[in-house]
Amino acid sequence: ERKVVIQIGLFPDDPQVLKRGYSAEWVSEGLKRSDKMMQEAGYDGRQVSVSSDPEDLSQLDEALKSRLDVAVIGYGIRPNPDLTFLLEKIIDRVRTQQPNARILFNVSPDSTLDALKRWNV
C-alpha cells in the first residue's frame, strides 16, 4: 500500500512568498517536480496549499479527512516569524485530526523525498 503524503505550503502567489523574494512560477514548478518525484518513488503525494491567514485552513481540514501517513510542512512557513501562529495551528490540526501521521519538514519542494528518507517512510 502506497504511503499517503501531503505537502503543506503557502499558495505560490501568497504575499508572504512574494515578500521573501520567490516568484509564484518558481514555487509552482518546484511543487510540480516534487509531485512527480513522489509519484515515481511510490508515494501517493499531493499538495495542500494554505493562505498565510491562520484563520483560513479549510483546504488543510479537507485533506485531513482522508487517510494520511505523513504531513510535510514546507520551509516557506517555518522560518517566517510572521507565520508562527499559522505553523502552530497547522501542527495542532495534523496532530489532533491525524494523530498517527508523522510530521516532517523540508527545506524546498525538491527536498521532500529527503525528509521521507530520513525517517524511512
Image: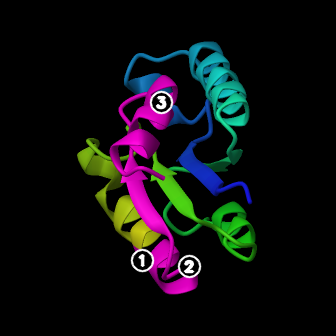
Residue 14 vertical position relative to residue 90 in the rendered view, above or below: above
Q: Which residue is at 30% across, 49% downward?
A: 82
Q: Which quadrant of the view contains residue 25?
A: top right
Q: Nearer the viewer, residue 48 or 81?
A: 48
Checking the image for residue 98, the label placed there is 2
Q: Would residue 96 be found to the left or right of residue 40 on screen?
A: left
- Mark 2–mark 3 Cα distance, whole angstroms, equals 27 Å
- Mark 1–mark 3 Cα distance, whole angstroms, equals 22 Å
Measured as percent of width and height from the top left, residue 31 is found at: 63, 28
Q: Nearer the viewer, residue 63 or 68?
A: 68
Q: Which residue is mark 1?
A: 92
Tag count in the figure?
3
Neighbour class for label 3 at 10 Å: few (<14), some, many (≥20)?
some
Q: Secondary structure at mark 1?
A: helix
Give the residue type that dot 3 points to.
Answer: Val
Measured as percent of width and height from the top left, residue 8 is found at: 55, 50
Q: Which residue is at 34% across, 43% downward?
A: 118
Give the residue type that dot 2 points to.
Answer: Gln
Q: Nearer the viewer, residue 35 or 114?
A: 114
Residue 39 vertical position relative to residue 110 in the rendered view, above or below: below
Neighbour class for label 1 at 10 Å: few (<14), some, many (≥20)?
few
Q: Earlier in the sequence, mark 1 or mark 3?
A: 3
Q: Nearer the viewer, residue 57 or 66?
A: 66
Q: Is residue 116 part of the magenta span, yes or no?
A: yes
Give the residue type that dot 1 points to.
Answer: Asp
Q: Earlier in the sequence, mark 2 or mark 3?
A: 3
In the image, which is nearer the foreground, mark 2 or mark 1?
A: 2
Give the extent of the magenta segment.
Answer: 92-121
Q: Which residue is mark 3?
A: 17
